[in-house]
């Protein structure tokens, strides 16, 4: 099977010829330079992945990951998130870019070139400008979570503004050829969801449903932390799958596969911590565990539980995907 056919089969809950390799975010410049010659999409292919990321970029002049307040109201200090400034309705207006600016985040010529170079790979797009995560980062943790109790209408307006932008981005990405979309919506920690299930149903689920209904391609939900108790609402939202399944947060891939594998494609669960060390047998052991628990019957795509980030051992990253390819066949 061709890589994009392999991914499509899994998303339809059919067993392909082998488990797809599907890393969502590669944020390691050294790795991109080393095996991709500085080209991110080539890096995906050279790692043996079945997918390539649709090219995109922040709005021109964006302050994201720099210093100061960016266009979303997030505060950055030397590239690290340091809080949010959105506290009022006026702030929401000030720190919400017009959906018309979505066009400035994509270059159609670059998208066409990637499809020309890699016609057999699954083209996908992911964004962290999502209703819940983008809202609590814009307001700051304290302001947002207090507002959930004291100013629910403010929270809804904030989340609405992020939802509209997300839909605009996803629709444009799909129009440029993205066959899978990834919603980066971090919603949990090691102890479980950041908010109660009742609040999730009231404040978050409706926006997730809107996003999924607004596009004609499958949407995968990404979240770090233990999201196990939220998975029934992931199914209800209409997500095609879920990514991260962080083992260090207590997510049991075997349990999730048994309980939710019929409804959700599972992506990830390989512990990223093993890639920060030099024990290659530990890397291979982690690959074997994920394949044994996730692969049977289809419905699983192998990847780390987070991303390929700066500071990882590059040899470990390459060994993980080299070895995964040897175990992936059904």
Image (spheres, rainbow, N blue to C red):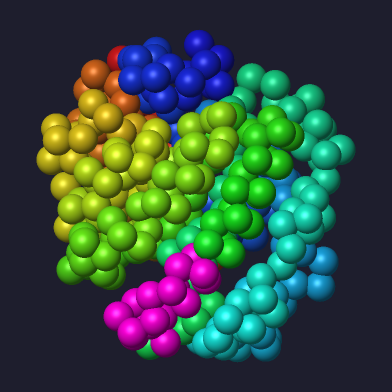
Residue for point 48% across, 21% down: 8
Nearer-the-camera pick, 117 or 195: 195
**Whether residue 96 is visible:** yes
Q: Is residue 151 magenta?
A: yes
Q: Quadrant of residue 258?
A: top left
Say above or below: 25 vs 212: below
Nearer-the-camera pick, 21 or 235: 235
Residue for point 43% across, 74% down: 153
Say above or below: 170 vs 215: below
Say above or below: 318 vs 16: below
Nearer-the-camera pick, 92 or 183: 92
Task: Report the magenta residues as a range.
Answer: 143-159
From this viewpoint, which residue is outermost toward the right? 109
**Residue 105, position in %: x, y?**
76, 54
Say above or below: 119 vs 215: above
Residue for point 51% across, 45% down: 211
**Residue 218, position in %: x, y?**
49, 32
Nearer-the-camera pick, 12 or 99: 99
């Amino acid at each position: 099977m061709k890589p994009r056919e392999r991914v499509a089969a899994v998303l339809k809950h059919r067993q392909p010829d082998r488990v797809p390799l599907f890393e969502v975010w590669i944020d390691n410049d050294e790795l991109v330079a080393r095996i991709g010659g500085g080209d991110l999409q080539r890096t995906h292919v050279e790692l043996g992945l079945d997918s390539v990321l649709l090219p995109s970029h922040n709005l021109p002049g964006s302050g994201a990951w720099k210093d100061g307040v960016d266009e979303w109201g997030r505060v950055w200090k030397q590239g690290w998130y340091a809080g949010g400034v959105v506290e009022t309705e006026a702030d929401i207006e000030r720190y919400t870019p017009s959906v018309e600016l979505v066009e400035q985040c994509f270059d159609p010529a670059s998208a066409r070139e990637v499809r020309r170079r890699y016609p057999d790979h699954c083209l996908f797009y992911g964004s962290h400008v999502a209703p819940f995560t983008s809202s609590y980062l814009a307001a700051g943790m304290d302001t947002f979570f207090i507002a959930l109790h004291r100013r629910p209408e403010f929270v809804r307006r904030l989340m609405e503004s992020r939802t509209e932008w997300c839909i605009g981005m996803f629709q444009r990405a799909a129009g440029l050829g993205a066959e899978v979309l990834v919603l980066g919506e971090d919603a949990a920690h090691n102890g479980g969801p950041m908010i109660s299930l009742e609040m999730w149903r009231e404040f978050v689920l409706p926006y997730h449903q809107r996003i999924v209904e607004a596009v004609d391609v499958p949407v995968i939900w990404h979240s770090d932390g233990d999201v196990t108790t939220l998975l029934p609402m992931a199914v209800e939202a209409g997500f095609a799958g879920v990514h991260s399944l962080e083992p260090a947060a207590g997510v049991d891939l075997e349990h999730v596969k048994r309980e939710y594998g019929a409804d959700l494609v599972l992506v990830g669960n390989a512990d990223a911590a093993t890639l920060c060390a030099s024990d290659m047998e530990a890397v291979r052991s982690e690959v074997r565990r994920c394949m044994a628990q996730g692969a049977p019957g289809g419905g699983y795509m192998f990847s780390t539980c987070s991303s390929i980030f700066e500071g990882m051992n590059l040899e470990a990253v390459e060994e993980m995907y080299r070895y995964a390819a040897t175990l992936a066949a059904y």
